[in-house]
Image: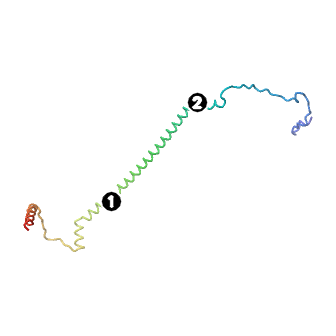
């Protein structure tokens, strides 16, 4: 037949009909034998093996240990950063205090200078240096004071 040598699709309805007994009877495939096994059925698969349970416990412990170490590291890093920030702030405060102390010492030396005070007294207030000097001797008055207080008590008692 020239039909098979072309590119046309093979048509099954164009085949010659052969009616043999083998083709008309259905074929049964043999299946493997089915063996029934007695047991607990679905309940048999419910138990967990002790080895698997032990591995699961070890995994959970290791996971908790890993999380605990991570939290501890974060807490330590936070505390370290906080301490470093506090130290830096304290250092800046100390430097500012030292600078201000130096400025105050300079101002004190300038303001307490005898020449500056003399210049201000003469220029602003019109004061002049005195020619006389007065010396107060307190050594002799220390002995006289107790007697004076005793005399004052006696005079108060008489009145």
Question: Whole-Å distance between the Cαs marked 1 and 2?
Answer: 77 Å
Left/right placement of residue 56 relative to residue 81 reads: right
Split into 4 quadrants, where in the image is the C terminus? bottom left
Q: Nearer the viewer, mark 1 or mark 2?
A: 2
Left/right placement of residue 30 relative to residue 114 reads: right
Q: Give me the residue at 79% from left, 26% from top.
A: 30
Mark found first going from the N terminus, 1 or 2: 2
Secondary structure at numbered mark 1: helix
Split into 4 quadrants, where in the image is the N terminus? top right
Question: Within 10 angstroms of label 2, few (less than 14), some, or many (20 or more) residues?
Answer: few
Q: Which residue is mark 1?
A: 100
Residue 124 rendering spot, x and y as whole percentages = 25, 73
Q: Which residue is mark 2?
A: 49
Left/right placement of residue 133 relative to residue 106 reads: left
Secondary structure at numbered mark 2: loop
Residue 59 rendering spot, x and y as whole percentages = 54, 35
Residue 119 rendering spot, x and y as whole percentages = 23, 70
Q: Quadrant of residue 8?
A: top right
Contact, mark 1 vs mark 2 (Cβ under 8 Å): no
Q: Nearer the viewer, residue 89 or 101?
A: 89
Q: Nearer the viewer, residue 84 or 115?
A: 84
Q: Quadrant of residue 33?
A: top right
Q: Is residue 118 above or below residue 15?
A: below
Question: Within 10 angstroms of label 1, few (less than 14), some, or many (20 or more) residues?
Answer: few
Q: Give me the residue at 7% from left, 64% from top.
A: 154
Q: Nearer the viewer, residue 108 or 56?
A: 56
Residue 132 rendering spot, x and y as whole percentages = 13, 70
Report the disc number at residue 114. none
């Amino acid at each position: 037949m020239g039909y098979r040598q072309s590119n046309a699709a093979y048509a099954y309805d164009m085949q010659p009909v052969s009616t043999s007994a083998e083709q008309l009877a259905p074929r049964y495939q043999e299946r493997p034998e089915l063996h029934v096994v007695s047991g607990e059925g679905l309940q048999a698969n419910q138990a967990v093996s002790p080895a698997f349970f032990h591995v699961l416990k070890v995994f959970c412990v290791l996971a908790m240990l890993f999380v605990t170490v991570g939290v501890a590291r974060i807490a330590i890093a936070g505390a370290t950063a906080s301490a470093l920030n506090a130290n830096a702030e304290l250092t800046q405060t100390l430097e500012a205090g030292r600078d201000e102390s130096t400025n105050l010492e300079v101002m004190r030396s300038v303001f307490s200078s005898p020449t500056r005070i003399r210049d201000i007294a003469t220029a602003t207030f019109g004061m002049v240096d005195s020619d006389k000097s007065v010396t107060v001797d307190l050594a002799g008055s220390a002995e006289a004071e107790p007697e004076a207080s005793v005399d004052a008590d006696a005079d108060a008692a008489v009145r």
